[in-house]
Amino acid sequence: MLYAYLFWNSITLTSGQTDAAIEADIADLSKRFKEGGIPSLARRVAVLSRDPRLSIYLLIDPQGLPMAGNLNKVPDLKDAGEGWKEFEFVRITNNFEEKHAARAKTFTLPQGFYLLVGRDVEEFHKFSEVIFNSMVYGLGMTVLFGLVGGVIVSRNFTRRIDSINRTSSDIMAGDLSRRIPVRGSGDEIDQLGINLNKMLSRIESLMNGMRDVTDNIAHDLRSPINRVRNKLEVTLMKPASPEDYKKIIQETIAEADELLAVFNALLSVAQLEAGARDIQKEMLDIVDLTKQAVEFMEPVGEEIGARFDLDLPEAPLLMKVAQPLMSQALINLIDNAIKYGSSDETVISVGLTKSKNTLIIYVADNGPGIPPSDMSRVTERFVRLDASRNRPGSGLGLSLVSAIAQSHGGKLRLKQNLPQGLKAEIVLTLDA
Ligand SMILES: Nc1ncnc2c1ncn2[C@@H]1O[C@H](COP(=O)(O)OP(=O)(O)O)[C@@H](O)[C@H]1O
Ligand SMILES: [Mg+2]
């Protein structure tokens, strides 16, 4: 439609110009005719006819003979009457006879005279032909490129959808590590691939988390349960006094309690890591929360003669946190500092540092610390370093702290405390 419009527009513009030129000539000639009748008109036609350009004139007398004008042959138009005519005529240029197209307006004048005023439109016809041809050619090319482009795009599209389909089949067949190929072009299909891959990573990590928990239960909880069972069996094998039984039963209850605590901790870590537990956060003063955790642990620390060194800001610092979880995390860190950070004079520093958009709550001690090679390992579930085997614990404390920090959009960072000891930091990002 655009091509047709362009064609039609350029043709009407050019032919309009031709018609306007003819009308101008007619106006001129009509003036002469009114002033001096046929003789004046004939003179004017003769003068105009000398113009070698594209104009065509012809004045015919009542006998049908040309009186003036530049048409070599009188075209057979007289019977056709007045009005616009299109015809062919012979033009002689450089002694060559050429057939040219013409457009003219004809008039019958009084007493049987006949006037024709026109223009050679051969050039214009050639011009329209060229335009028409290029339009057709252009249209053809447009259709061709459109089709080829369409085929390429749709093939490409189908191929990429195919690869998504293939990958999902592989994944359904059990290979969760497969990922949809992404080209990095950032288009919709890429975006789809990226999102599906993110989803797959999440599913994979959830699955791995599940597997870890199952493994943990199978390995790490089995032996304590076995221990309890064997102890009871051994007790039954030989006779004992009611006091002995009572003692054994009390010990068993204590061990069962410990097991339950481990179970709960394990579940909490797993749930937090899976993000399944939608934790309820509320706006709280984190300074106060830290203070309370220290106060809660102070009596435990006093037992080993530990001194607390607090460095907390005066002003309250409001933040969205899940209070029970965050308190638990701080208590775990302080508990570790008391258990493993002891030295001749144990100093446990607890403090808060705030920069532009991060908030760090740290718990540091001046004990032996953790060797750098074990730093990343100790946050894994059930990992306890050999040096700590003789202290109570299950190796889940730091896992829980890490999971809690992550569920608050932060992380647990362990570093060497200077000059000695361990510095555990809960790094949180402050929003806005
Ligand atoms: N403050 C500390 N100083 C030295 N070692 C530590 C400290 N905190 C933790 N650790 C080491 O990291 C291990 C894992 O800690 P945690 O996950 O809290 O388990 P648990 O306290 O039950 O042993 C501990 O067993 C101990 O070896
Ligand atoms: Mg601990």
Image (spheres, grey):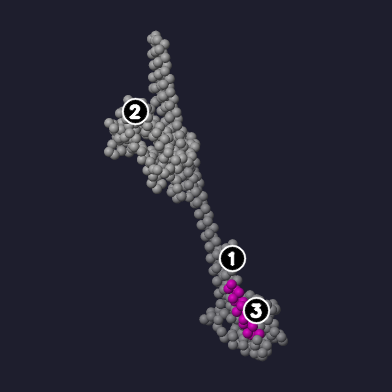
Residue 94, position as x, y percentages in the image: 52, 81
**Residue shown at the point (41%, 46%) measured from the top left:** 357
Give the position of the N terminus as an image quadrant: bottom right
Front-lying residue, 287 or 380? 287
Kind of element beneath mark 2: helix
Residue 33 is situated, as x and y percent measured from the top left of the image, at: 66, 87
Residue 5 is marked as 1
> Mark 1, residues whose alpha carbon is within 10 Å: few (<14), some, or many (≥20)?
few
The residue tagged 2 is 303
Say how many tags the image has: 3
Mark 2 to mark 1 CA distance (whole Å): 97 Å
Q: Residue 105: which disc?
A: 3
Identity of the residue drawn at 65% across and 88% down: 32
The span picked out in magenta is 13-30
The chief SS type of the magenta part is helix
Element type at mark 3: strand
Q: Looking at the image, which is closer to me, 173 or 432?
A: 432
Q: Is residue 161 above or below residue 67?
A: above
Q: Are marks 3 and 1 in contact (CB under 8 Å)?
A: no
* Upstream in sequence: badge 3 or badge 1: 1
Mark 2 packing: few (<14 Cα in 10 Å), some, or many (20+)? few
Residue 325: quadrant of the picture? top left
